[in-house]
Image (cartoon, grey):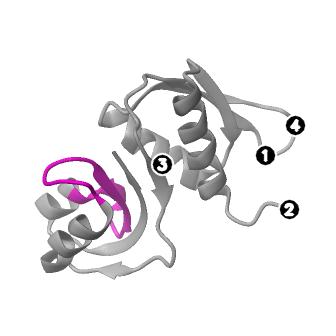
Amino acid sequence: MLQDPLADALCTIKNAERVGKKECITRASKLIRSVLKVMQGKGYIGAFEFIDDGKSGKFRVELKGKIIDCNVIKPNYSVRVEEFSKWEKRFLPGREFGLLILSTPKGIIDHKKAKELHVGGKLLAFVY
């Protein structure tokens, strides 16, 4: 039984990257689509497409081999704009290396964009 679809999708992507595959297939949802768009915008993955299977659907994700690690952050901590450096130190390996993905009132964005927009939110995932 699937408990966390986002965790399952990120784990599938991470495992396929480690094995050296060029693409992988994950479950589909609006949250997963938004997170994949952020990862695609920053160059961690290539194109992804929706595959309709008559149920919720799936995503075929093109991998570039740039992901070292990605995972969800549980529990989803609330973060204010002033606290981003604390969470970067906790989940990312170095300064200006990797992304924290957040759910904000402006949508699902990375922490760098959230700093620019001066908004806080809930931590969803990290990738580097």
| Direction from residue 25 to residue 23 in the image, left or right | left
**Residue at screen point 43% across, 40% down:** 37
Residue 56 disc label? 1
Label 1 sits on a secondary structure element that is loop
Q: Earlier in the sequence, mark 1 or mark 2?
A: 2
- Cα separation, mark 4 vs mark 1, equals 7 Å
The amino acid type found where label 4 is placed reads Gly
**Residue at screen point 13% across, 54% down:** 95
Label 3 sits on a secondary structure element that is helix
**Residue at screen point 33% across, 35% down:** 41
Q: Foreground: 8 or 119?
A: 8
Residue 34 disc label? 3
The amino acid type found where label 1 is placed reads Ser
The residue at which mark 2 appears reads as 1
- Cα separation, mark 3 vs mark 4, equals 21 Å
Find the residue positioned furthest to the top: 22
Residue 3: percent from left, percent from top: 74, 66
- Cα separation, mark 3 vs mark 2, equals 23 Å
Instruction: Check disc 4: other Cα within 10 Å, few if <14, some if 14-19, many if 20+.
Output: few
**Residue at screen point 37% across, 29% down:** 66
Instruction: Check disc 2: other Cα within 10 Å, few if <14, some if 14-19, many if 20+.
Output: few
Residue 106 disc label? none
Q: Are marks 3 and 2 in contact (CB under 8 Å)?
A: no
The residue at which mark 4 appears reads as 54
- Cα separation, mark 1 vs mark 3, equals 16 Å
Number of disc labels: 4
| Direction from residue 125 to residue 14 in the image, left or right | right
State the extent of the magenta-drawn residues as a range.
92-111
Q: Quadrant of residue 23?
A: top right
The answer to whether residue 12 is above or below residue 61 is below
